[in-house]
């Protein structure tokens, strides 16, 4: 009776089990802080002051050599209101493959009106220094981040409050700096609205192509004049939209928060639409996935790496379709991008075990446990099983002989082991049964019959061994022997519904 299908269900469970297993070492102690990033102080010669940065690297960063897009977040010192939310949303969306994982650089304020506003406002003579702040990004901050971290040439600017003004101003002043902007309503006060809107209008009316992205979120309880500017901007962008430009100006019901949230989730999902493989995507080989993300790279204008979880799911699909070679190639490709992918090691271990290649299965289980050694009872159990078979299984040695020299050599090996009074090898029904089904799946039905016959000889009181032998005879077209063995199986186990169903079919022929 077939028993190998259960591996697929265990594999699917494991995808969930190892879903968030990227932070792999648990060296924290009682009382340690929970950390989502690091503080970094850099000195700005342009602004003549130190600037505090809050830096979050993707959870997989230390386990790969990949580069990542960068999200620059203004008002970065507001951890609870902005920075933590950006981290949580980017990690959630990144881990599922909806977006690429992001490096997040929170830029703390020192003088928000000076740095974020392009025009002076009443009562603040120090305001209106946005051009200098843009120079800080261009000449100091972005080069520093690119030197210090593995970054892709793709930058997102996110700005709340006065930072929203800076976001739109930076987009139209230095459009090559930021590929995408996520912000609140940039028309927050009369002086800057009057300054910014006509310049924005002129920019878009004179721009034929612009492969950038803009997402603005407004709450409907804002000042009417601010909302009017935002509505005018939406109409302008609709009528004067340059080729390749994507945008959304959204008007929402009030959130009820004193500090309104930034549209991280909605904006990032729209910005990276298509990053997650479509539900109906058909993977035949790893090249299909590589081709998909190469096309997406052209659309995004940076090299997009296939998400690790997508590779796991697509490889699992190939395994369930019986495309074992293609699945192995895909999981190996996954490890080339993500050398510490638990899912890839687990799937390869399971795949090789299912093929009877126990040395390779052991290699991948061990690799898994070298990375993560806690809460892994299932993997340790698999490894123990494989090591037990390698060291003491008669079925394993016989299968190795069959692989090398054919079925007759395997049968000879069986007789040698059985006749050796000093042999400590064990003969397990389940292992011989699995060997037989591997041979059947490989199209070697006659060889499978011989293996199932050995299992009948070894375990003549088991209903299952007769059921499996009957199936092999049925597949070979030997109806008489199939019926005989199904009847024997049913005699030993009257509740064997599979044997009942097969007999009913065979006896109708």
Image (spheres, rainbow, N blue to C red):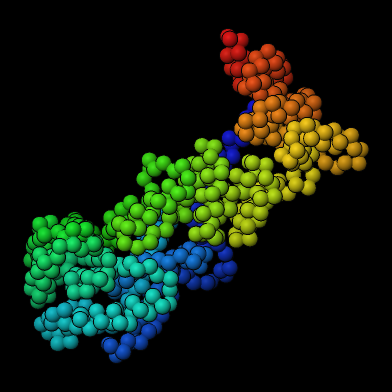
Q: Is residue 128 left or right of residue 500?
A: left
Q: Position of residue 185 (x, y in %)?
A: 17, 66
As rendered, which of 417 and 91 lies closer to the eye? Answer: 417
Of residue 39 and residue 458, the one placed in the foreground of this image is: 458
Q: Is residue 230 visible in the rendered structure shown here?
A: no
Lateral position of residue 492 relative to residue 98, left or right = right
- How many badges with numbers are in the image? 0
- Residue at x 32%, y 87% (from the top left corner): 44
**Residue 286 location (% of width, % of height):** 47, 48
Q: Nearer the viewer, residue 407 or 372?
A: 407
Residue 417, placed above or below residue 174: above
Residue 325 visible in image: yes
| Quarter occupied by the N terminus | top right
Residue at horizontal 66%, vertical 24%?
472
As drawn, 304 above or below 168: above
> Is residue 207 toward the left or the right of residue 374 in the image?
left
Q: Quadrant of residue 417?
A: top right
Task: Tell me the residue at 10%/57% (across/down).
Answer: 239
Is residue 438 depicted above or below 315 in this figure? above
Compared with residue 431, is residue 32 higher up or lower down, i.e. above or below? below
Which residue occupies the foreground of this view, 356 or 59?
Answer: 356
Residue 127's x, y, as percent? Answer: 17, 83
For image coordinates 63% across by 60% down, the residue present is: 370
Q: Quadrant of the C terminus?
A: top right
Q: Residue 213: horizontal and vertical position, in percent? A: 24, 61
């Amino acid at each position: 009776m077939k028993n190998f299908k259960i591996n697929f269900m265990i594999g699917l469970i494991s995808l969930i089990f190892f879903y968030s297993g990227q932070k792999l070492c648990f060296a924290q102690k009682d009382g340690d802080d929970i950390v989502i990033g690091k503080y970094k102080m850099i000195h700005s010669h342009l602004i003549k002051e130190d600037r505090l940065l809050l830096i979050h690297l993707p959870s997989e960063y230390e386990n790969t050599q990949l580069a990542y897009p960068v999200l620059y977040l203004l008002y970065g010192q507001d951890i609870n209101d902005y920075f933590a939310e950006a981290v949580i949303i980017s990690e959630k969306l990144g881990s599922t493959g909806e977006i690429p994982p992001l490096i997040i650089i929170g830029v703390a304020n020192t003088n928000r009106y000076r740095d974020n506003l392009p025009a002076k406002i009443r009562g603040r003579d120090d305001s209106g220094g946005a051009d200098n702040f843009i120079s800080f990004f261009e000449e100091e901050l972005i080069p520093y981040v690119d030197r210090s971290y593995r970054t892709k040439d793709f930058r997102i600017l996110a700005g709340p409050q006065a930072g929203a003004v800076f976001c739109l101003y930076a987009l139209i002043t230095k459009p090559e700096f930021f590929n995408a902007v996520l912000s609140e309503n940039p028309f927050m006060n009369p002086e800057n609205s009057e300054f910014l809107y006509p310049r924005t209008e002129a920019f878009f009316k004179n721009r034929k192509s612009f492969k950038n992205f803009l997402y603005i979120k407004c709450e409907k309880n804002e000042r009417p004049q601010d909302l009017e500017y935002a509505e005018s901007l939406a109409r302008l962008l609709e009528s004067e939209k340059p080729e390749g430009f994507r945008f959304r100006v959204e008007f929402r019901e009030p959130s009820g928060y004193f500090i309104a949230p930034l549209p991280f989730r909605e904006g990032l999902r729209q910005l990276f639409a298509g990053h997650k493989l479509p539900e109906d995507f058909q993977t035949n080989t790893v090249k299909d996935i590589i081709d998909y993300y190469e096309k997406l790279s052209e659309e995004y204008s940076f090299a997009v790496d296939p998400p690790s979880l997508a590779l796991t799911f697509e490889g699992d699909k190939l395994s369930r379709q019986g495309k074992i070679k293609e699945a192995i190639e895909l999981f190996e490709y996954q490890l080339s991008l993500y050398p510490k992918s638990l899912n890839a090691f687990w799937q390869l271990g399971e795949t090789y075990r299912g093929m009877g290649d126990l040395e390779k299965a052991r290699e991948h289980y061990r690799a898994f446990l070298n990375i993560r050694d806690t809460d892994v009872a299932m993997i340790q159990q698999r490894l123990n099983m494989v090591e037990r078979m390698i060291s003491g299984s008669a079925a394993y040695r016989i299968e190795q002989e069959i692989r090398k020299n054919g079925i007759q050599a395997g049968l000879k090996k069986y007789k040698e082991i059985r006749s050796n009074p000093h042999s400590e090898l064990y003969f397990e029904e389940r292992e011989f049964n699995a060997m037989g089904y591997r041979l059947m799946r490989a199209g070697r039905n006659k060889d499978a019959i011989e293996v199932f016959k050995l299992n009948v000889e070894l375990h003549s009181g088991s209903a299952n061994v007769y059921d499996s032998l009957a199936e092999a005879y049925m597949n070979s077209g030997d109806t008489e022997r199939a019926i005989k063995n199904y009847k024997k199986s049913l005699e030993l186990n009257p509740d064997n519904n599979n044997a009942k169903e097969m007999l009913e079919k065979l006896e109708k022929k």
